[in-house]
Amino acid sequence: MPPSVAEEHEPDPGGVAAHLERLIRERVPGVEDLRLTGLVRISGGLSRENWVLNAAWRDTAGEHDLPLIVRRDPAGSLLDTERREEFAVLQALEPTPVAAPRALWLDEDGAVFGSPSLVMERVEGVCDWFVLNSDRSEPVRSGLARAFLEQLVWIQHVDWRAHRLDGALKDPGADAAVAALDRWEGELRRVALEPVPELELVLRWLRERARRSTRTVLVHGDFKPGNALVVGDRISAVLDWETAHLGDPLEDLGWITNPVRAKEHQIRGLWEREQIVAAYTAATGHAVDDAELTWWNVFSCWKLAVIVLTGQHEFVAGRFDRVHHSPTWLIRAMLRMIEEGPR
């Protein structure tokens, strides 16, 4: 377990251990001497319940001793996502260079765990949202910055057709930008407790300027150091694939070059927008139009604002215990980007 993640030593009111034991016995033939130890709910992750533990057993294939993590849907969440889709993505990533955890079992309808859940191997490493601006040496931070971009490029190189991901994820084709807007506008209409005129203004700006995509790639949807584990000077895992989908390659690039995420993704004077775009172009062979990238920067802020409103909605409904304030800071950033134009 990442040392930086706080532990919540608590009882198991949801019967996670008993549910997991049942799941393993159902899915693994000939299980004997099954032992589940060290069950802890960790505070990492704002949208799923995350439980870590160790599972040891013997079967016809031999002895097994695995560190596991169970991701279970809670009553209320910041994100409405499907464990079935997350599981399919993780399985598709297994034979690729992408550093993703190995998915083991899926409880798609919650028949075992009580709500949709997936079980995957737990990867060692430290989660540090601001590792690129930590007290590590500049060469290490620069190397990690390039390693993060390399992971992003590998994600986009995944042959989603060969892995039949279009069976789990919808291919938006050239309309990826419009599809992204449609999805998150649907969320806005569902969760907004009151009208937010500024978000309507930005939505209109985005719709008027949405471009057609030239290619479809696998998009992580929340790519950041806070969704990764680091061991020394290498990335051991990219986590939280629940918002992964098929879409435009500039969507994730727009997320990491978004000025409001600069402290997470950039190193002042060394690894900023210009260097990220140049490295991305060199790695992919695809030039980046600055105006189009700015569109995705604005979209990133707009999407994040909708997620903040989801937190408000779930808190008021009594399904989420964290207070979320108005996304005014994001609105200011969006309006500034629109006023200034391409960077």
Image (cartoon, helix red, strand yellow):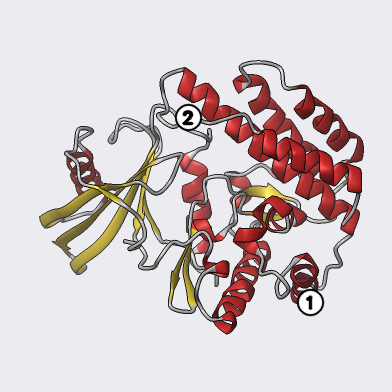
254 relative position to 315: left or right = right
In this view, 101 is above or below 205: below
Q: Can residue 174 be seen at all in this image of the molecule?
A: no
In this view, 190 is above or below 338: above
Residue furthest toward the bottom? 139
Residue 245 coordinates in the image, percent (x, y): 63, 47
Residue 25 coordinates in the image, percent (x, y): 19, 48
- Label 2, label 1: how far apart the Cα atoms are: 42 Å
Circle 1 residue: 282
Amino acid type of the residue tagged 1 in the rendering: Ala
Task: Please state which of the two labelled residues, at mark 2 or mark 1, is closer to the viewer.
Answer: 2
Q: Which sits in the foreground, 66 or 224?
A: 224
Q: Can residue 153 be seen at all in this image of the molecule?
A: yes
Identify the element where label 1 is drawn. helix
Residue at left 59%, top 33%? 308
Residue at left 83%, top 28%? 201
Quarter the N terminus occupies: bottom left
Q: Residues within 10 Å of mark 2 (few under 14, many from 20)?
A: few
Identify the element where label 2 is drawn. loop
Amino acid type of the residue tagged 2 in the rendering: Val
Circle 2 residue: 323
Please tell me in which quadrant of the rendered image residue 343 appears. Answer: bottom right
**Marks 2 and 1, the one that precedes in the sequence:** 1
Please tell me in which quadrant of the rendered image residue 126 appears. Answer: bottom left
Residue 33 coordinates in the image, percent (x, y): 8, 57
Q: Are marks 2 and 1 in contact (CB under 8 Å)?
A: no
Q: Which sits in the foreground, 184 or 91?
A: 184
Residue at left 65%, top 54%? 261
Residue 291 coordinates in the image, percent (x, y): 90, 53
